[in-house]
Amino acid sequence: MTPSPPSRPDTATESAVVPDGADRPAVFPSSSGSLRNWLAVIAVGMGVFAFTTTEMVPIGLLPAMSRDLGASEGTVGLSVTLYGAIAGLFAPVLTVATRRLDRRRLLLLVLCVFVGGNVFTALSSSYAVLMVSRLLTGFAHGVMWSIAASIAIRLVSSDQAVRATAVVFSGISIASVVGVPFGTLIGQSDWRIAFWAIAGIGVLILVAVIFLVPSLEPRAVVRLAELPKLLRDGNLRTATLVTAAVVIGHFAAYTYVAPFLEQDAGIPSGWVSGLLLLYGVAGVVGNFAGGAAARALRTATLACILLLTTAVVLLVVNGRWHPGTIALLLVWGIAYAALPVCLQTLVFASAPQAPEAATSLYICAFNVSIALGALAGGWVVDASGPSAVMFLGAGFTVVAALLMTRYRIARPE
């Protein structure tokens, strides 16, 4: 069933907005706050965790994969870069192509591709086979990101939608803190073991989805030609541009945070991995803080962007005072991790009549901006050093804050 369009397509309320009908939980006989509903939401969040882990885990296994497959570390590194590019660029196309599928069936299909892709990765006998398996998984990744939050909010009542979104996106933060380091650890003796383990986790999530997630018919049927029309909405266009500016700024700086910490902040090299782990833990906190704060949507998003900007700038100004560096790094982690929840909620608020199609545009902007941010940061760090790249990142987040002021809030009738 296609929901009726909102009465004010150019505006969104200050409270979090979810797609029409999300306040009616799907086919569960118990209340929308039941344990089974939330276990289903957690299962979807675990899917996001698994996809994020498999995307990033090669970073810690590059030397072993390079030796085994007879390719340079830079070449094997393309299995991460191209994976992200495929996930972002094809998310809108694949989301539209699967628009008529029951969302439960689509989720099961995506998880099956995920398991198969990781099995093929573990069995890769050459670099070519590795890349085919990684790109196959990348296609599924884009669809997973496009549908995960919209599925989760249909499992709970409207007043719990932002919390459900936070649970789903916590999979990203938890993957950074637990999934990627654990995958790197168990893959030290044989990198293939890490991908077998990830495939096994995928099977467990698949079983959980079979038993916990109900049938969810698609609600908004959008054709590919209609995707550009969604961007005519001023708020959705603003949300997409804010996403791009924030992500470019963050990854321009964060990609090179290790050399900054060692060279400019004077942090001993042995501390860096521990500090980045603390950053990840702070990110988990920030993710759920974003879920709580996102009810005041524009205010929360703008506050997180400004907090992120301030932390990055003060890291440079702070110099070599280690307690200040550590505190500001944690603030950075909290502020950035809160933003995906806020930004996803902005997208839902801007296009409640087509949440998955709008999310696919958001995912496209997000993933492409990761590559652009890392690329821009690389140019600047080579030319001017790590501190300069921090200012570059802050410059983009200032642009994001200015764009955010253009987001319009609906006035009470």
Image: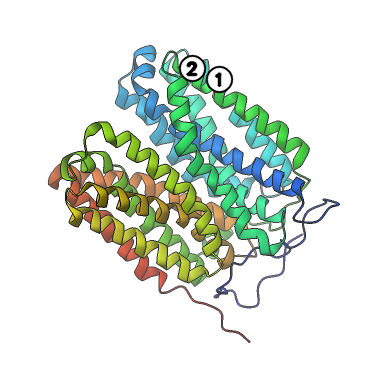
User: Mark 1 and mark 2 in contact (Cβ < 8 Å)?
Assistant: yes
Could you tell whether 180 is left or right of 322 in the image? right
The residue lying furthest to the bottom in this view is 413
| Nearer the observer, 40 or 361 | 40
Q: Which mark is residue 192?
A: 2
Q: Residue 386, how many percent across, how many down?
A: 19, 45
**What amino acid does circle 1 point to?**
Trp
| Nearer the observer, 207 or 8 | 207
Q: Residue 205, how many percent across, how many down?
A: 66, 33
Asked if residue 396 can be seen in this view, the reply is no
**What amino acid does circle 2 point to?**
Arg
Which quadrant is home to the C terminus? bottom right
How far apart are the two marked residues, 2 and 1, measured between alpha carbons?
Answer: 6 Å
Asked if residue 172 can be seen in this view, the reply is yes
Q: In which quarter of the image is residue 313?
A: bottom left
Badge 2 crowding class, 10 Å Cα cut-off, few under 14, some 14 to 19, many 20 or more, is many
Q: Which mark is residue 92?
A: none
Q: Residue 232, how many percent across, how many down?
A: 51, 69
Tell me: residue 335, above or below residue 197: below
| Nearer the observer, 370 or 298 | 298
**Disc 1 target residue:** 196
Q: Quadrant of residue 358?
A: bottom right
Could you tell whether 109 is left or right of 357 in the image? right
Residue found 34% across the figure and 51% down from its top: 250
